[in-house]
């Protein structure tokens, strides 16, 4: 199965009638992750048919409003919908105080467990792991403490080669898990069939790197090397490179350079400044450096294979 | 000139695709007031063509999310638009801490003066006054500390009766202000023309009372007696009166009873629960008690004469 990424918002700075601030919904293995949560994200989730109860983990890159002002509203709505499942929030130190202060003053504590994982490290760290998925931070260079996030599938089980298995009557369904785990099979006559004969290699694990607001920062390249898909912000075109430097943002050209250096398969760009009426120029500029570039657009779904 | 009220949002609890939480924009004399500011209000302001720089005073009734989660985003957007004019926020104690904490952690202090007027009184108080307008709080009964707001024009100047004035060559433009102030006019021949001959009574001052979330609370009646227009929440119909009591909200029937007791000219109802798919029933229920009832609807403009 592929990773599925839904763009809920991809514009910078201020929400406008047809320009939602950053938020993405990532379906990876058995997980449904929300990445950033600008104002209006809960409405976008409804608009694109995301079932609220599926979201158990929210990753916030940094505490600029266009990346998290929608979070407190989402948390409150979950409460009003009588959510019981726990919700994990990963974000910069301070996010817990911001949310809990508002819940306290509105006398609206959640009746579901709300768990904060505050981030302070300036090196990449593993912040979530289970049997199928890992999430690592990608330290970025912005005006405030900011992390990107690397979502990686783990190597899965070996896949049953049913064409071969079906030839052996002795192999039963109850043996399948051992085969998936890489064990050889012993026949009653004492001989052994090697696992490699009965199974195929696991599917290649997929990975997605989300790099929100950052200046051109080649230090991230080792963290995102060879990922299947990189989202990298491009607030500006190269005509505004000086402004990108001052505000610690990137140009489309710079995002493409990072994608090229990291040898990623696919680049998605977004976080466009409201100065640009037509976003096609972002794609044109990036593709001069890195051909396999796509524009983030609100509501667009990317299947990452 | 009439008061002009634009409904930016009129639904309760959670923002949905076609249901914006509470916010209203009131034009009264030379002022442009924003009343409550649910999530997404800044987008609604853009949608309905309100010039951001006109808003200098924001009144927040209480600290439930559907009435103020859009405020921090609006304040931040004003900053990004290089606002210089001061902005006054009137709301319950705690609102300053909520906003300043977020500005601090995002390293985004406003470059315009941001002035908080925190409210704690449980009796009605005058919170804004200039030569033309007064704003008083209306203490309400809700689950958290909540105020409604009474916006009142002051009695204006006397109006020049040009038909009469034009008969007297001696009365010049430079005399008009004295006449508006009620002074008589002395002719060169020593005789006096009484002011009442030269001017008309001032227009009757108009008033608007905004009563957001509250239970049925007749204690407000003296504060809103004879207002031109009352907005009173009606989260529920009378079929859910028990739920209204538990959650400290009002039914359409109760809002209409308040309007009748206060002898207001016009009632606007809103803050509908998402349970009701068709809001017409709110109007029907209210009109059984108080005929001159109107439904708040997003984008609707009321001219209050």
Image (cartoon, coloured by chain):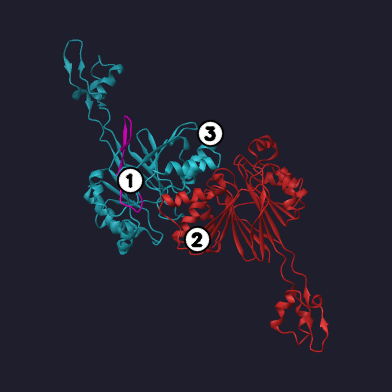
Chain colours: A cyan, B red
The residue that mark 1 highlights is A148
Q: Nearer the viewer, residue B206 or B140?
A: B140
Q: Chain of mark 3?
A: A
- Residue at image point 22% right, 20% down: A183
Secondary structure under badge 2? loop
Residue A257: x and y in percent read 24, 54
Real-space CA distance between mark 2 and mark 1, rounded to the nearest whole angstrom: 33 Å
Which quadrant is the C terminus of chain A positioned in? Answer: top left
Whether residue A135 appears in magenta in the rendering, the answer is yes
Secondary structure under badge 1? strand
The residue that mark 3 highlights is A82
Secondary structure under badge 3? loop
Real-space CA distance between mark 2 and mark 3, rounded to the nearest whole angstrom: 40 Å
Residue A41: x and y in percent read 46, 46
Q: Nearer the viewer, residue B82 or A29?
A: B82
Most distant residue in the left direction: A191
Between tags 2 and 3, which lies in front?
2
The residue that mark 2 highlights is B113
Can residue A16 be seen? Answer: no
- Look at the numbered discs 3 and 1 and tell me whether their residues touch, using CB distance below 8 Å: no
Q: Is residue B153 left or right of residue A124?
A: right
Real-space CA distance between mark 3 and mark 1, rounded to the nearest whole angstrom: 31 Å
- Look at the numbered discs 2 and 3 and tell me whether their residues touch, using CB distance below 8 Å: no
Q: Which residues are magenta?
A: A126-144
Q: Earlier in the sequence, mark 3 or mark 1?
A: 3
Whether residue B23 appears in magenta in the rendering, the answer is no
Between tags 2 and 1, which lies in front?
2
Local packing at callout 2 (Cα closer than 10 Å; few below 14, some 14-19, many 20+) is few
């Amino acid at each position: 199965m592929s990773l599925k990424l839904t763009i809920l918002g991809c514009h910078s700075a201020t929400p406008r009638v047809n320009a939602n601030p950053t938020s993405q919904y990532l379906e990876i293995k058995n997980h449904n992750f929300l990445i950033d949560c600008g104002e209006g994200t809960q409405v976008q989730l409804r608009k694109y048919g995301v079932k609220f109860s599926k979201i158990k983990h929210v990753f916030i890159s940094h505490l600029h409003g266009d990346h998290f002002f929608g979070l407190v509203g989402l948390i409150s709505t979950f409460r009003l919908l009588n959510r019981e499942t726990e919700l994990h929030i990963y974000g910069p130190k301070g996010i817990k105080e911001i949310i809990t202060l508002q819940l306290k003053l509105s006398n609206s504590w959640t009746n579901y467990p709300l768990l904060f994982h505050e981030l302070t490290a300036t090196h990449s760290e593993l912040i979530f792991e289970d049997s199928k998925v890992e999430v690592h931070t990608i330290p970025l260079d912005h005006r405030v403490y900011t992390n990107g996030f690397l979502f990686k599938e783990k190597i899965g089980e070996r896949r049953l080669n049913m064409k071969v298995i079906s030839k052996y009557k002795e192999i039963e369904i109850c043996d399948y898990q051992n085969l998936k785990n890489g064990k050889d099979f012993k026949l009653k006559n004492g001989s052994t069939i090697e696992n490699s004969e009965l199974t195929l290699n696991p599917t290649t694990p997929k990975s997605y790197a989300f790099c929100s607001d950052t200046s051109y920062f080649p230090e991230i390249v080792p963290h995102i090397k060879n990922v299947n898909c990189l989202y990298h912000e491009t607030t500006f075109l190269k005509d505004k490179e000086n402004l990108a430097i001052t505000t610690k943002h990137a140009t489309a050209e710079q995002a493409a350079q990072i994608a090229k250096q990291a040898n990623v398969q696919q680049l998605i760009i977004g976080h466009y400044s409201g100065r640009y009426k037509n976003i096609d120029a972002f794609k044109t500029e990036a593709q001069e450096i890195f051909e396999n570039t796509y524009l983030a657009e609100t509501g667009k779904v990317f299947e990452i294979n």
